[in-house]
Amino acid sequence: MIQMFRSGISLRWINNAGFELILPGGAHLLVDPWLDSAQIYPLEVQSLERVDYVLLTHIHFDHGHSIGEIQRRFPDARILVGDLSAEPLCRLKHLNVEKLYRVRGGETYEFDDVKIEAISGRHTESKRGSYYMEGGNLTHDGVQDDAMWYGSLEMLNYKITASDGTTVAVWGGMTTDEQVHRMEHYKNNDIAIMHVSPKQNQQLFAALVKAINPKVVIPHHYDLWDVMFKNNPEMLKDAPLPPEKMNESYILGQIKESLEKNCPNSSFLILQHQKWVRFGLGMALM
């Protein structure tokens, strides 16, 4: 299906949940940057040409680990992060708080070249749960890991509206009926970049896509699976699917089939890492 856009943006998937967008006026916007230190498809901060905005959905290492290096290279970049997470992030990454926007769900931030709406989300759940000063929220030395704790406690999604009217929904986290109803208030998008997971209920995910109503759905957060399962084989014991089906080929195939059946007006686009795609009057690889 060929999708048509008003004027458009350029976009590339860096890795995991990380994306870079070039807005119509030339500004660069990063989402959840995990760059030099990434276990998968690392990208040097020094290779970035420009950064004007950074949106952090939450502060887990695989979403915001590079924010300190980014601010040092681009000190005027505007960084949007959850209100509760801002203080620990400044402490952990030695950030200049004067360049931070402490964001709460339901707020709108309108700049000259982009409007950014913050949407309350929920981090994905685990069978072990997440408890203060327990389990995965502690470092090896038994000290509270603020990035892990606040990353699970506070999560945001975003709707980006460029100056030409192009809209991009950034969605991740737990697929719930609450999120479906919440996202109905931010519907009719050109592009939706969406976290996918084998833990998701496919009917509920399709309902979420319908609520967002995008022309194109771009999946993310599945490229880390092989590394996770290799480093933590015990995860496969509690997996929602048989081990032979716990791979991106099978799961993306299931999602694609579900969306073709339930959301025929939305195209499912799987991107290559770090390859630019232009969304304009049509769509083209760059």
Image (tube, rainbow, N blue to C red):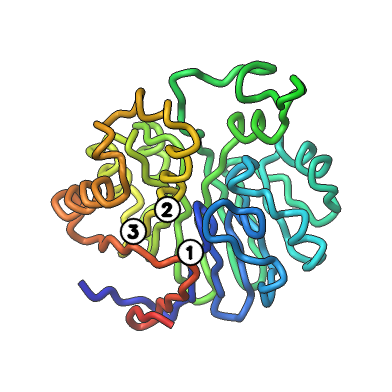
Compared across the picture, whether 172 is left or right of 262 comes to: right
Residue 240 lies in quadrant: top left
Amino acid type, residue under disc 2 in the picture: His
User: Of marks 1 and 2, which one's residue comes earlier in the chain?
Assistant: 1
Q: Is residue 270 above or below residue 257?
A: below
How much space separates mark 1 and mark 2, taking CA atoms? 8 Å
Residue at 66% x, 54% y is 37
2 relative position to 153: left or right: left
Amino acid type for the residue under numbered disc 1:
Trp
Asked if the residue under mark 3 is in contact with the one under mark 2, i.e. CB atoms within 8 Å, the reply is no
Residue at the disc numbered 3 = 217
Mark 1 and mark 3 lie on one chain; the one further toward the N terminus is 1
Q: Quadrant of the N terminus?
A: bottom left
Contact (Cβ within 8 Å) of mark 1 with mark 2: yes
Within 10 Å of the Cα at label 2, are there few (<14), some (14-19), or many (20+) other Cα atoms? many
The numbered dot on residue 220 is 2
Q: Nearer the viewer, residue 268 or 6?
A: 268
| Image location of residue 284, percent across then percent down | 36, 81
Other-residue count near label 1 (Cα within 10 Å), few / some / many at <14 / 14–19 / ≥20? many
Which residue appears at 42% of the width and 56% of the height?
193
Side (left or right) of 59 relative to 22:
right
Q: Is residue 118 above or below residue 78?
A: above
Distance, label 1 to label 3, CA atoms, is: 13 Å
Please tell me whether mark 2 or mark 3 is closer to you in this view. Answer: 2
242 left or right, relative to 153: left
SS at mark 2 in the image? strand
Q: Secondary structure at mark 1?
A: strand
Numbered mark located on residue 13 in the image:
1
Q: Residue at x 58, y 63 (%)?
A: 115
Depth check, front residue: 4 or 246: 246
